[in-house]
Image (tube, rainbow, N blue to C red):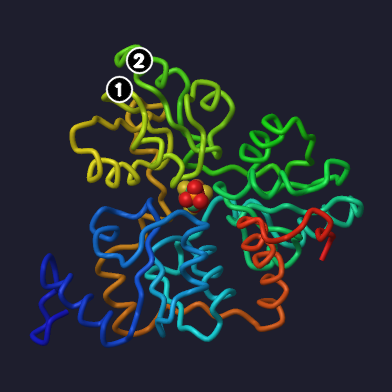
Amino acid sequence: MTADNRPLAGDDLRAEIDRLRKERNAVILAHYYQTADIQDLADFVGDSLELSRKAADTDADVIAFCGVKFMADTAKILSPEKIVILPDMDAGCSLEDSCPPEKFKAFREAHPDHIALTYINCSTEVKALSDVIVTSSSAETILSQIPPEQPIIFGPDRHLGGYLSRKFNRPMLLWPGVCIVHEAFSETELLKLKAQHPGAPVAAHPECPPVIIDHADYVGSTSGILQYAQTFQGDTLIVATEPHIIHQMEKALPQKRFIGAPGADGNCSCNICPYMALNTMEKLYVALRDLQPRIEIEEGLRLRARRSLDRMLEMASGTIGLGDLGPV
Ligand code: 13P
Ligand code: SF4
């Protein structure tokens, strides 16, 4: 709102966010699934691993996290002295919801010889119950450092876990969670789209079910898919992940065509993440103005969750030896 109570919009809204960002010494971090206006305004746009690294390294006083809650929680776990704000506290994740900590704890207790390799898309409590966190861009590097005889529980995404298990020929006990966004792609509609664009490769996120992965020419994290978009041969790419990522592709390669893979109804609106979509420019402005909603995590829980996240950061950059891994 302006001083005379008019709602802020367009350039005025962007200018106010800029003013507050400087006044608060804030850094705005955004995931590739945020809307184009938020991506363009952010200080840094990245995948889950890159955003975690930025959150751990920044010297800003405030982190304004434009992503979902588990990402903002991760920023707070890694940078407890900073104020971490999330424009909409209801920006959750179906994978986090699928994995209640008490059920995960019981699952772990039923398999005491297994370590828990856990996707970052989970609650702080589940991170605290895990041995090593992975993101989609670090999972393969980390898995390859775990001794082959070590049994593994992988949660909460059964599709990412299944993909890794098949690729590494390594059995893992999978938690039965899914991402509602990637689960919504339709194989039938994808095949129709491929027939309309003969020769166009498909890039898919490993959160997709196997029926989609089986048609993919490239499988990887959001940053991996963006790298593939820079190098693929041809003029059209079919993108099987949340479609807001296409904004970065169109900016980098305006001469090429990027088409979002369709959902069951033949258009891709069901593949927009409803949680990411809760963050808006207006809510970001209010969050910077009021320094609310703010992430708070009880210190004992934070320290327990930090161990598995630190292991991820170390193993993702290959700084931990094979023999160093054991249950926390
Ligand atoms: P990445 O950006 O790490 O590939 O994760 C995708 C995702 O679903 C985030 O919620
Ligand atoms: Fe969660 Fe899927 Fe949305 Fe990512 S895209 S935040 S995994 S619901």
Pointer 2 or 1: first along the chain: 2
> Which amino acid type is shown beneath numbered disc 1?
Gly
Q: Residues within 10 Å of mark 1 (few under 14, many from 20)?
A: few
Q: In the drawing, does residue 160 fall left or right of residue 196? A: right
**Residue 93: x %, y % from top left:** 52, 54
Asked whether 198 or 158 is in front, the reply is 198
Asked whether 58 or 242 is in front, the reply is 58
> Which amino acid type is shown beneath numbered disc 2?
Gly
Q: Residues within 10 Å of mark 2 (few under 14, many from 20)?
A: few
**Residue at the image position 67 percent from the left and 31 percent from the top:** 167
**Residue at the image position 20 percent from the left and 81 percent from the top:** 19
User: From what the image shows, is residue 37 above or below residue 265?
Assistant: below
Choose top left, top right, bottom left or bottom right for residue 242: top left
Choose top left, top right, bottom left or bottom right for residue 269: top left
**Residue 230: x %, y % from top left:** 34, 37
**SS category of the residue bearing label 2:** loop
Separation of marks 2 and 1 at Cα, in angstroms: 8 Å
**Residue 199: x %, y % from top left:** 35, 15
Choose top left, top right, bottom left or bottom right for residue 20: bottom left
**Residue 232: x %, y % from top left:** 36, 29
Q: Is mark 1 within 8 Å of ligand 1?
A: no
Q: In the drawing, does residue 313 fall left or right of residue 203? A: right
Residue linked to disc 2: 199
User: From what the image shows, is residue 47 above or below residue 284?
Assistant: above
Residue linked to disc 1: 234
**Residue at the image position 45 percent from the left and 61 percent from the top:** 91
User: From what the image shows, is residue 4 above or below residue 160?
Assistant: below
The residue sitting at the left extreme is: 4
User: From what the image shows, is residue 72 above or below residue 104?
Assistant: below
Count of picture labels: 2
Q: Tell me the quadrant of the picture where the N terminus can be found.
A: bottom left
* Tag 2 and tag 1, C-beta contact below 8 Å: yes
